[in-house]
């Protein structure tokens, strides 16, 4: 029997581990290895005592009961389960063959998705009266602006699995409006007047929110709409991220970026696919314009965050976990496993911005850098020619 959609609440949270990484002088520039979470004590700064960094990793796949029914499953991470993630929420959803996430809309959040397994068919209606039906496969993404009505349907005779991201950490509790939930709470007489159907027809309608329903297996080609005269949307809701994302190769991995520049309808988020090879690190950096949210597709690693006033914390994560980094907080990632660490990353801004520690130092006069860290001219020259990105 399915649990209610409102019953996503989970009391589980990741425990933290203790290992403090202290760095002085030039060591501040080099990530230190950590096999467990690192905590900093409360520090006093110019603005008074600073609380230690809160936990920023959550096990979305194993940390909550979620929703389970004959049509599929859904597990989420909102501010209720993952308090630090105020700006982005997420759901891992599985649909079985013939199943669909019913017609619905979100009043307070746009919806982004990445296909992990199988195939999905979506329908969406826009405020201008246009519509779009698209088929997605592994590596594709979609984006539905806030308030746009849509439906998700498993395509074919195999299950599908996808990651949903929302540009508001509170979306689930306050932002989902389902068609069956609405209609089941309206009198048959009003529905008859509104639809032209007889009042008795609504006796067979669902009497509560369906959420994930089951039906006939969807097949290609795409079927015709109920009203074939409704025009098709001129704004593409589909983007082939793994094929057309902006690619950048590094010595220790690669990234594929999709911002509003490449995918114009994606106006509130930027997406990034990142691979970090075993033993490699994603260099120390920060993002001045956005929070960062990560989902681990495979592998394991350490994520280390710097929150000012000596507050540094490192937490391990692995496949099925998510993490969150506040806007402007310095951080780096280290692959601590034997397989490629694969990440899906979201930023709550339409364009990608980054400042790395290496680039910042290189943008200053050599003598100034030497005076800061007490290093020699030869060491300063090494900084200028060091590898960047993922290495």
Image: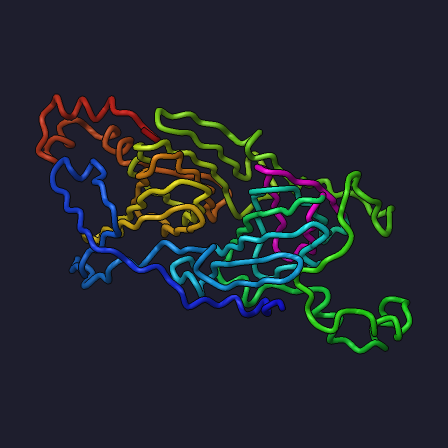
Query: Is residue 15 shown left or right of residue 165?
Result: left
The mark tally for this picture is 0
- Specify whether residue 342 is painted magenta: no
Rendering quarter of residue 298:
top left
- Relative to residue 243, is residue 1 depicted above or below? below
Q: Quadrant of the N terminus?
A: bottom right
- Relative to residue 326, is residue 13 depicted above or below? below
Query: x, y (%) of residue 165?
Result: 53, 51
Residue at 19% in and 28% down: 365
Residue at 63% in and 42% down: 118
Query: x, y (%) of residue 303?
Result: 32, 45
Q: Main secondary structure of the magenta part?
A: strand
Query: Is residue 343 shown left or right of residue 228?
Result: left
Q: Quadrant of the C terminus?
A: top left
Query: x, y (%) of residue 98?
Result: 73, 52
- Relative to residue 362, is residue 144 depicted above or below? below
- Residue situated in front as seen by the camera: 72 or 351: 72
Residue at 59% in and 69% down: 4
- Residue situated in front as seen by the camera: 128 or 175: 175
- Relative to residue 117, is residue 277 depicted above or below? above
Query: x, y (%) of residue 373?
Result: 12, 35
Query: Is residue 230 shown left or right of residue 125?
Result: right
Q: Which residues are magenta?
A: 131-156
* Coloring scheme used: rainbow
Residue at 26% in and 52% down: 37
Rendering quarter of residue 25:
top left
């Amino acid at each position: 029997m399915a649990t209610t959609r409102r019953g996503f609440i989970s009391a589980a949270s990741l425990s933290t581990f203790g290992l403090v990484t202290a760095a002085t002088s030039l060591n501040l520039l080099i990530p230190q290895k950590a096999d467990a979470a690192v905590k900093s004590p409360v520090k006093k700064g110019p603005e008074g005592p600073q609380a230690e960094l809160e936990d920023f990793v959550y096990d979305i796949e194993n940390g909550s009961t979620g929703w389970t029914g004959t049509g599929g499953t859904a597990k989420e991470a909102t501010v209720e389960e993952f308090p630090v993630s105020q700006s982005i929420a997420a759901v891992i959803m599985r649909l079985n063959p013939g199943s669909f996430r019913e017609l619905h809309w979100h009043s307070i959040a746009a919806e982004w998705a990445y296909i992990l397994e199988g195939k999905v068919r979506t329908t969406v209606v826009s405020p201008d009266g246009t519509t779009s039906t698209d088929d997605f496969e592994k590596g594709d993404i979609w984006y539905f602006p806030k308030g746009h009505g849509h439906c998700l349907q498993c395509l074919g005779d195999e299950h599908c699995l996808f990651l949903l991201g929302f540009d508001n950490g509170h979306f689930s509790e306050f932002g989902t409006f389902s068609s069956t939930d609405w209609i089941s709470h309206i009198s048959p007489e009003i529905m008859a007047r509104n639809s032209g159907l007889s009042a008795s027809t609504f006796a067979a309608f669902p009497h509560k929110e369906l959420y994930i329903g089951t039906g006939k297996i969807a097949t290609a080609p795409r079927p015709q709409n109920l009203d074939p005269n409704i025009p098709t949307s001129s704004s593409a809701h589909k983007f082939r991220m793994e094929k057309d994302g902006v690619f950048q190769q590094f010595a220790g991995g690669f990234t594929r970026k999709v911002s509003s520049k490449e995918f114009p309808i994606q106006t509130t988020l930027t997406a990034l696919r990142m691979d970090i090879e075993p033993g490699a690190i994603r260099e120390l950096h920060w993002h001045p314009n956005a929070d960062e949210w990560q989902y681990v597709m495979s592998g394991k690693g350490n994520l280390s965050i710097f929150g000012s006033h000596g507050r540094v914390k490192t937490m391990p994560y692995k496949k099925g976990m998510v993490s969150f980094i506040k806007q402007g907080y310095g951080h780096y990632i280290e692959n601590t496993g034997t397989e490629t660490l694969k990440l899906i990353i979201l930023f709550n801004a339409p364009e990608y911005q980054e400042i790395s520690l290496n680039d910042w130092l290189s943008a200053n006069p050599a003598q100034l850098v030497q005076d800061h860290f007490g290093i020699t001219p030869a060491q300063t020259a090494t900084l200028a020619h060091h590898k960047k990105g993922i290495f």
